[in-house]
Structure formats: C-alpha cells, structure tokens
Amino acid sequence: MPAPPAWHEVPPEQVRRFADLAMERLPDIVKDILRAMGQEYPNLDFTADETGRPKAILAISLALENFVQQLTETTERPSELPEIFKEFGGNAALRGRSLDSLQAIYRLNVRLAWRSLAEIGQQTGIPPPAMYELAESAFEYLDELVSHSVRGYAEAAAGQAGERIRRQRLLMDLLLTEHHTDPSAALAQRAAAVDWDLPDEVAVAVLLRPSHESVSPALGDGALLDTDGEQPRLILPDPDTPGRLEQLHRATAGWSGALGPTVPVARAATSLRWAALAARMIQDDLLPQGRLLHCSEHAEALVLLPADDLLDDLARRRLAPLADLGPGQADRLAETLLAWLETQGSAPAVAARLGVHAQTVRYRLRQIRDLWGEELDDPDRRFELELVLRTRRLRGRPTPPIA
C-alpha cells in the first residue's frame, strides 16, 4: 500500500513515532476489538488455531501490523493473511451467518481500530489532512481483505448448496422408487438430512420446459424440485393444505405439465407414474398444453387413450354393425348411441344433449336397435360400447375402420 500523498509532508521522524506507538499499543487495540465483538455479537464463535489461540486475534494483529508497517517501509503482505480472511468467510457461511452480518463485524473492527489510530495521530501531532488520507487508505486496505472473505463465503455457500442439492436428489430418488418393503426409516433419515418435514401425503408433478432458458419455478412450503433432467420433477407435500395448490399454480404459470394424484408418501412413485403418463399425452397433443393439469380431472383420458390397441380391436368388433353405413350416418348413429348409453335411454334427454328433435332421436334409436339387437340388453356389451365410443370422442376423430 503506497503512503498517502499527505504523508510526504509529515516529517519522517513524526511518522516513525506514530508507527512505533501504534505497534506498541497493538495488543491492547486487538483486545479492545475482541471485547467489543463479544459484546456486540455474543454468539460469535472464535475458531482456534492448533495452539488454541483464537484465529481472530492472529488475523486482526497481522492486519493492523501490516497496515502500520507499510506507512514507514516497503513490506510484503503476510501470505497467510488472505487465507485467514477467506477462511473467516467460509466459516461464516457454514455457521449460517449472512454475508451482511460478516461485513458488519468487519466495519465494527475497522471503526474501533481507527478510533485508536486517530488518538495516536493526535498524540504524535499528525496533521488532520494526513489522517484523513490515512483513513481512506485504511478502508481500501479493509476492502481488499473483505474481498477474500467474500470469496470464501461464496465458495462455502456454493458447496453447501451443492451438497444440499445432492442430498435432496437422493431423497427424491428414494421417494419416487417403487417399494416392496416399508421405506419409512430410510425416508425419515434422508428427509432429516435436508431438514424436510416428512409429510403424510404427496402429489408428484412432471413439468415440461417452455424453453431451455426458462427459469425454474419458485416454490415454497417444502416442495422438492429436481430440474436436472429434461422434464423437471416436483414433489408437493400435503397437497390438500389450504392454498397450497393455488401457490403451486402461480409458481408454474407458463409451464405445461401434470400433477399426479395425492397418495401416501411411501407411494409417491404411483403419483409419478400417472403424472409422467399425462405429460407424454400433453406432448402428443392428447391433453391440453400451457398449464399444470391435474390427473384426477383427466382420469377418463388417462385410462382410455393409452389402451389404444386393445380399444381399437374392441371397437372393430363392437361397432361392426356400422361397417356398411356411410360415414355421415355412422357418425350420427355412434353419437346418438353414446348419448343414449350416458342418459340411460331417455329420448328427450338424448335429444337435449345432441341438440336435435326428440322424434329424430327416436328414429335413430330404432335404427340402433335394428343394428345391435339383443346386445343392447346385455350390461357387459353396453359397457364395452360406451368404452369405445367415449374413446372415439376423446380422440376427436372417428374410430379405426371397422372390418
């Protein structure tokens, strides 16, 4: 640190007296600083070196000694000083202190140290302009040391965050695995490792990124989020808690995805399975995009559409009576048959649902009776007919060609 310009106007012997007196009083200055730190921050831990001496004493002593020495001679900064201050920053992060609180401690230190140096300046007759410039140099000196603490703090905080993410991922992997034995003990252990309160129930969501640059949803209330894969996975604890689903929807605004059913925490894999299925159907345009869907609200589509091979075969057999009709007539009769099955056979109710005259419905129902005959009186056949016709409606297109 070059001496401030005003120091060139102070006689060398006067500067030497200032430096000698400061060095003489340095142990008392350090003690005063440590005492004030203990009073201001009673819970502050002082890490000890291998001799049992608080490292804070060494750091403050070295910093002040080096600062004073540079006023009268050219001297290298002690090599251990940056490392000590970097370690202070790292320890603060590991103990849960904020960076602001760490910097406040440093400001207290320099204020107390400067108060003592100012008194020494008065005793040795250092002119005020020189002392003002010395104060500026002191703060620059402190800023450089603080930068090492900030670096140490950032590295420790990043390490903590990385470790927490790793532990959280281990917890999520265990939660989302199918279990053949009771996983309660293992789940409790991994949950404790990330300070997560193990809930009674969960719902699992699979999200579809709007783009690769999308910012991850800002979740609260203990939700777990793993964004490592192409499709982020989310575990929502106790989804029925008032306001929790509303908060989730606000956080995932602009995202597509699906939220699986609420299940006991040990069966989270079941919720994931339905959410993943729904996410695939969203990608295939079988379910709407642009929002987080609830699987329970799309149960019909989730059950029927994935079974397309089985239901196509069933449709060819059960809708065979329509094979000889024209496409338009076949569609009208299929639509009327489904409405009839859903309304338990009331012609006025079918007419209201289809928006046609009741007499038209009666005419179509006579045609349907002629085509299917006694099959319409068999509960199993009616159920199969409703299955294939509901699937046809969900697809928004006609059933496969009827052989």
Image: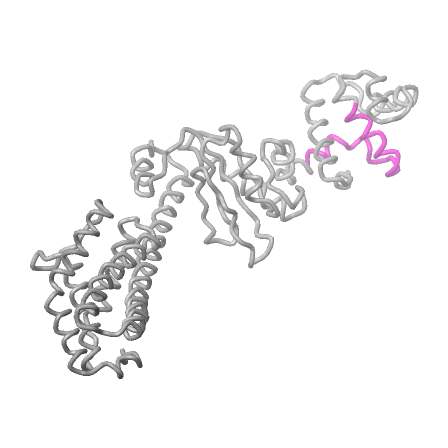
x 71%, y 18%: residue: 378
Q: Position of residue 46 (x, y in %)?
A: 17, 53
Residue 110, quarter of picture: bottom left
**Total numbered labels:** 0
Residue 316 colored magenta? yes
Q: Position of residue 213 (x, y in %)?
A: 56, 59
Is 33 positioned to the left or the right of 394 in the image? left
Q: Magenta residues, as a range?
A: 313-339
Q: Nearer the viewer, residue 114 or 55?
A: 114
Residue 362 colored magenta? no
Quadrant of the snapshot with the N terminus: bottom left
> Is the magenta region chiefly helix, strand or loop?
helix
Q: Position of residue 108 (x, y in %)?
A: 27, 56
Q: Position of residue 264 (x, y in %)?
A: 43, 29
Residue 339, quarter of picture: top right
Identify whether 244 is placed above or below 360.
below
Is 40 positioned to the left or the right of 32 in the image? right
Is 284 positioned to the left or the right of 350 in the image? left
x 21%, y 52%: residue: 37
